[in-house]
Amino acid sequence: MGILIETICGGLVGFLKFYIVILTIRVYLTWFPNINFYLQPFSSLGKMTDPYLRLFRGIIPPLIGFDLSPLLAFIFLTFLIDVFSSVIF
């Protein structure tokens, strides 16, 4: 039973690290206003990341025109990675 839990937690940690990379790319791409997010591959990237980012959008209000909700999303993912990594070791 312990090996199964370690394997599942290890897989989740790997997935969450990959998802952080995808979120980072998505956030960086928002800095370029000439990118059309309705074209591929940006459309797929938005479909994978926007639902998660929308969860945090209303929690932190924008400050001086900057949306800080992705910061909270990254903090939560990092917390989950730490929790699942502690189960493995």
Image: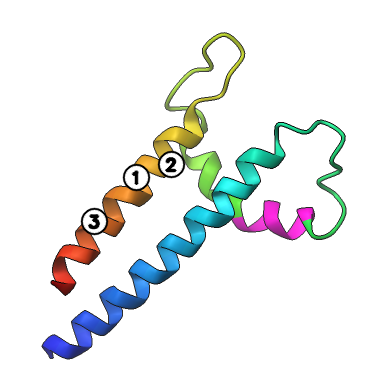
**Amino acid marked by disc 3:** Asp
User: Badge 2: few (under 14), some or many (20 or more) residues near its Cα, within 10 Å?
Assistant: some
Distance from the alpha carbon under mark 2 to that under mark 3:
14 Å
Distance from the alpha carbon under mark 2 to that under mark 1:
5 Å
Q: Is 2 located above or below residue 42 in the figure?
A: below
In the picture as drawn, the residue positioned furthest to the top comes out as 64
Left/right of residue 81 with respect to residue 60 in the rendered view: left
| Disc with the residue nearer the chain's start (2 vs 3) | 2
Residue indicated by mark 2: 73
Left/right of residue 67 with respect to residue 9 in the rendered view: right
| Position in image of residue 82 (x %, y %) | 23, 56
Q: Which residues are magenta?
A: 42-48
| Position in image of residue 47 (x %, y %) | 68, 56
| Position in image of residue 49 (x %, y %) | 59, 52
Circles 2, 1 touching at the beta carbon (< 8 Å): yes
User: Badge 1: few (under 14), some or many (20 or more) residues near its Cα, within 10 Å?
Assistant: few
Residue pictured at 53% horizontal, 17% vertical = 62
**Amino acid marked by disc 1:** Phe
Residue indicated by mark 3: 82
Residue indicated by mark 1: 76
Q: Secondary structure at mark 3?
A: helix
- The mark lying in front, picked from 2 and 3, is 3
Left/right of residue 65 with respect to residue 63 in the rendered view: right
